Every structure is written in C-alpha cells, then in structure tokens.
Image (cartoon, rainbow, N blue to C red):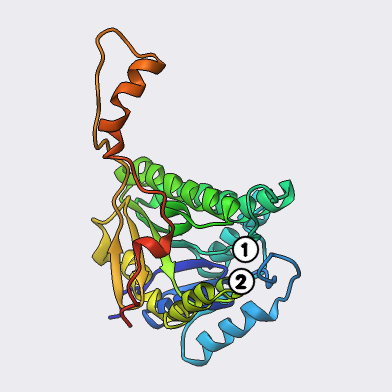
Amino acid sequence: MKNLDGKVAIVTGSGRGIGREIALLMAKEGAKVVVNDLGGSSDGAGNDTKVADEVVKEIKDTGGEAVGNYDSVAEFESAQNIVNTAIETFGRLDIVVNNAGILRDRMVFKMSEEEFDSVISVHLKGTFNMTRLAAPLFKEQKSGRFVNFTSTSGLIGNIGQANYAAAKLGIAGLTKITALDMQRYNVTANAVAPFAWSRLIGTIPTETDAEKERVKKIQQMTPAHIAPLVAFLASNEADDVTGQFFGVRGKEIVVFSQPRPVRSTYNSEGWNIESLASVKGALKNSFTPLEVSADVFPYDPLV
C-alpha cells in the first residue's frame, strides 16, 4: 500500500523544477496526477504543451497515472478547467498543490504596474482560484489537502521583489484562513517556502561576488529536496498538521514562527507624537531587524 493510493492530485506548474519533482513523487506514492503547466518562460510568456506532456509520459512510463493540462491558474475560468480535468479524468480530487509561479524582479521605484499585477495574478490570484474551486469539493467529501507555496521573500524579505514578496506573504495569509475555514471539514492547508535551484531562481543576477556566492549555495539545493515534505503534507500522516508555514533548505526542514505580539505599552491618557517618542526606545528592543533571507540563513545548506 502506497501512501497516496487512491488519491487524485493537481500540481500546478509541474512541467519543470519543483513542481515536476512533486508530481513524480506523488505518482510514485500512488496518486493519480494532473500535471498542469502553461509551458511559459520564467516571466510567464509563451505556451508550450510538451512541457507538461513530457512529465505525463515519464509518470506513465513508470506505471503511474497522469494527465496533462495547459490552462493558466491566473484566470478563474481556466482554473476551473484544471479542476474539471481531474474530475473528468479520474472522478475525484483530493490534493491541490499550488506551485505555479513567475518572476518579474525590479526595484520598487522602477517596477511597472504590469510587472506587479502579473506576478500577483499568477501567484496570489492563482492560488485563490484553485483554492476556491477545489474547496466546495473538499467540503462535500469532508477531506482534502491544500499545499501552497510561499517564500522567504515574503516571510522575511528580499531586495527587488516587491511584487513577488507581496504575493507570497498574501499566500501565507490565504493559507491560514483556508486552514481555519476548512478545519471542520477535515481539510488541511499548509504553506512551504522552498530553497532550491530552479529556472526561476536562475534569473537572479550574478554580477557581484556576493550574488555569485549566493547562487552557488542555492545550486546545492535541488527541487527533489522539496517534494517529500509536500507528499507528506498531502498524506493521511499529516491529517493533524494545518495552518503551518514550512521551509525546506536541502535536507533541513524549518517551521516558521507566525506573527504574535512581542511587547506592548499602555497610556491611560492616550497617545500623541511626544509620548510615543518617549517610549520608542523601550519598544525598539523588540523591533524585527530589517533583514533579507540570507541574513536569517547565513550558513551553508545542509545537503
């Protein structure tokens, strides 16, 4: 008996990289997989159906069951087609992995409206679309798994990724509310922040020695490191794990803290600028440092 026998999974953006590894492992664990991939470039342009078809063939060649889908998650109607593909081909849906994404990195003072909107549409709106369309099915059958992809760009911070960070932190919030809304129906929702070399990460500039060193570290971490945690969260073994944010960094798995009050101050007369200035020093000890992901994870990947 395999861990995902009898389950039907949709993995968005699964033609390459992290999504591909997830789709392959889920199929190996017995799931029937909808391999969704638009077949676009790292910035979302273009369409190539063979990207998904090659993964489907790889799954079938090893005795698994899979079907390709080439719709975009960013539009509600096309996202419905992805869900319909699962129902029409395999008769049910049990797992949705929201992995599809694009990058349009730019400093916030240079970022265009289109660059912001396109990243939000694929990551955040796309995750909502798939969640909204699968949730009624999960509610009716009183079971289901959502595994969403967040990022330390949102949870911690990275330079030049205002659009991506906004989308990924939004996904964290969406994941939390989905977990709360669906808990009574035995449906879980969790988010994973991956550290892995992929074609999206391959767009990171490598002009300075620091940038080259950062990329060198990331290249040690492969998409295959991410897939086991996702498969676990989709299995019955994780039926009591929900509303959590994980990180995978090589062979290291991280559980991220979530915002909670760390210090408070009270003034019976209310506050003004002067009184707030007088307590700033006491509060400042509890401020979160302005850091990027590399500051929080300065050590070499454990691979």
**Relative depth, front residue between 9 and 99:** 99
216 left or right of 179 in image? right
Q: Is residue 83 above or below residue 225?
A: above
Q: Secondary structure at mark 1?
A: loop
Q: Quadrant of residue 224?
A: bottom left
Res 205 label:
2
Tell me the CA gap for discs 1 and 2. 16 Å
Residue 81 visible in the current orientation = yes
Residue 261 place in picture, x, y as percent? 27, 35
Label 2: few (<14), some (14–19) or many (≥20) C-alpha neighbours in 10 Å: few
What amino acid type should be assigned to the residue bearing mark 1? Ile
Quadrant (top left, top right, bottom left, bottom right) of the C terminus: bottom left
State the residue in front, 130 or 278: 278
Question: Dot 2: what SS?
Answer: loop
Q: Residue at x 58, y 64 (%)?
A: 88
Q: Position of residue 60 (x, y in %)?
A: 52, 87
Residue 107 occupies which quadrant of the picture? bottom right
Q: Which mark is residue 102?
A: 1
* Disc 2 residue type (three-letter): Pro
